[in-house]
Image (cartoon, helix red, strand yellow):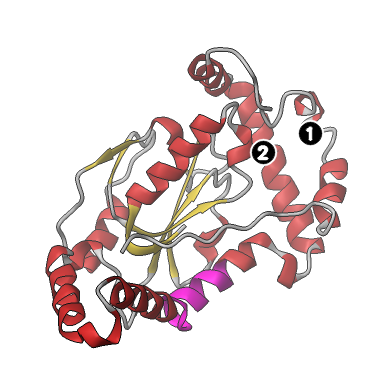
Amino acid sequence: MGSFSVCVHIDRQRYPAIQTGMKSCRNEYQQYELQWPLEDIDVGDFDKIWQEHCEDEQSLSEYACAMRLLAVDHWKKTTPSDHDRIEWCRRTCYEFFRGGGLLKCLEKDDRRRQHTLGGATNGENCETERKRMKLKTADYNTIRLPFTSKIRLLDVGSCYNPFMEFEDFLAIGIDIVPAVESVFKCDFLNLQVQEPLQLAPDTIDTFLRGSLRSPLERVPREIFHVVVFSLLLSYFPSPYQRWICCQKAHELLALNGLC
């Protein structure tokens, strides 16, 4: 069984605070209206386009500060909690890991496995398969129930790491140009994924708290419980680059993780 994925599309017509906020901060990033986010381009060297984009640190820094202002001073104050993107992510993670969501997914996966192995009449084979799968997956890279630890969350394109305020999360924020020091500078598209850490969960928490440094260039695979893309993928100039990001997020998730 692989990691689970939950996708949400933010409809700006349903969330007028986003449109209003964009207008209120127009002076801060008016220069980006024609080039930001990067639109799909039919031809061109996409890697070169992205590299040149990342090298424009002055413009990116101005944009990051403007987006933090927009999120903290406008969206957070004017958006109802049930429409707030950060609160939605927090609530979804909590329901998945502590509210029965993961259990439902595991039960559904078990029913699918039973069907594949011959249904209820083949219960012995199904039990054998469950034991085999358990032996194949180590505790260090598998999320098991009951889930009692902090939720290790990677926020890609974080800007200012809003998930740090929640005690249930061990939140790691990354961005190509962070707006605050608590976010690691990182180009996720070119982040190197290394072999997993074969460590106990509390030791992995300690590693994340104390061993990461900016600029972040490599991270062990299967280390996070959740990977969040919030208004991220549309900034890449090609669908292939977006696919690379989704693939990389899956590699960074522990088994039964959420993206």
Is the residue 253 above or below the residue 24 in the image? below
- What residue is at 51 percent from the left and 54 percent from the top? 228
Q: Position of residue 150 (x, y in %)?
A: 37, 71
| Rendered position, 235 above or below 258 | above
Q: Residue at label 1?
A: 28
Helix, strand or loop under label 2:
helix
Residue depicted at x 51% and y 14%:
48
Callouts 2 and 1 close, C-beta under 8 Å: yes
Q: Position of residue 27 (x, y in %)?
A: 84, 32
In this picture, which residue range is highlighted in magenta? Answer: 90-102
The secondary element bearing badge 1 is classed as: loop
Q: Earlier in the sequence, mark 2 or mark 1?
A: 1
Label annotation for residue 65 = 2
Q: Position of residue 1 (x, y in %)?
A: 31, 64
- Judged by its main secondary structure, the magenta piece is helix
Residue 254: quadrant of the picture: bottom left
Viewer-proximal residue among 250 and 140: 250
At horizontal 66% and vertical 60% (from top left) the residue drawn is 85
* Residue 27 falls inside the magenta stretch: no
> Residue visible at 13% across and 77% down?
128
In-image side of 220 versus 24 (left or right): left
* Residue 201 can be seen, yes or no: yes
Q: Position of residue 61 (x, y in %)?
A: 61, 30
Look at label 2 and name its amino acid: Cys
Name the amino acid, label 1: Glu
* Label 1 CA crowd tier, 10 Å (few <14, some 14–19, many 20+): some
